[in-house]
Image (cartoon, helix red, strand yellow):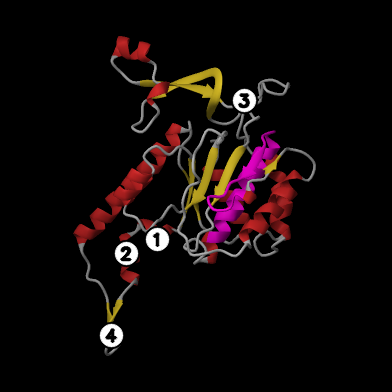
Amino acid sequence: MDSQLFPREFLQRLDCCGTLPPLRVQRHIRSGQNTAAGTGDSLDFQEYRPYVPGDDLRDLDWNIFRKSRKLFLRRYRMFPESPHRILPDNSASIRYRRVRAFTVWRSAALLGARLLHSGDRIRLESATDPEEKRTIAPGRDAVLQWCKILSAAFNKPQGKEEFRLPEQNERSRGMLWVISDFYAAATLDELIRRWHHASFIPIRIFEDDEYHPAVFREYALLDAEDKRRISPPDDPAFDSGYRQEMQRFESFLNTIALRSGGRLHRIECTESVETVFHRFAQSFPKGI
């Protein structure tokens, strides 16, 4: 196991995940009667929620529409027979800075550990390597086994492909959790078109300066002849537009989360073991 990614202190504290608020609510003790976090594809009705553009129209309740002229979807319970699928970003861009990569993969370990402590099965998901899709069931040493799987996947040789989601099909059962900064070479409008029907719970890792337009002033052009540094000028219009685009970006991610019955989670990057536990707990104060 990678001792830098998962040092002994991290593994020891991971055993305490069972003392944190659970990510699911256990209502019965018999198999098949434990409701999991979020909604799923069973026939057991759970709740209504307002329609979000991109939702499957087959889930609309037309009786409510006829009475209220408002669009609501019927949501159904998810049972632990469908494992939670966890997809940590392992693209070249996320690994460019070690603090970002470590935050992504340690968050995946924390999420998996809490789900295992809650009695759910989990599976490592990969958009590029189907062989990485291994399911872990709750039990003795399950958390340690999960960390070994994550460590092996993290240390596999990686290409230069950008982050992408796994293909969705009828066999893709269970809630999908995606841990990434969600930055891509595509423009935001293109990303919105690409993920228009996507459904997953996003866990967005970030660094604090990403939310301040001044971060771009740290970049500069270099004159090709004399190597003179050319800094971009201050532009209030750019600052305002940057903040608006960041708000639109995260609003879009939250819309995707709503389709899965959850919300957008945010975790600030850190290499400190103690701090990543604290920030993860802050992002999940009451489950999903």
Q: Earlier in the sequence, mark 3 or mark 4?
A: 3
**Stretch of the chain drawn in magenta:** 101-130
Q: Earlier in the sequence, mark 3 or mark 2?
A: 3
Q: Position of 37 compared to 245: left or right?
A: right
Q: Is residue 102 above or below residue 136?
A: below
Name the disc covering residue 209, or none.
1
- Residue 269 in picture, x, y percent from top left: 51, 57
Q: Observer-nearest residue: 225 or 212? A: 225
**Residue type for callout 3:** Thr
Q: Say if mark 1 contacts mark 2, CB within 8 Å.
A: yes
Q: Observer-nearest residue: 90 or 27? A: 90
**Residue type for callout 1:** Asp
Marks 3/2: CA–CA distance: 45 Å
**Residue type for callout 4:** Ala
**Residue type for callout 2:** Ala
Q: What secondary structure prevails in the magenta region?
A: helix
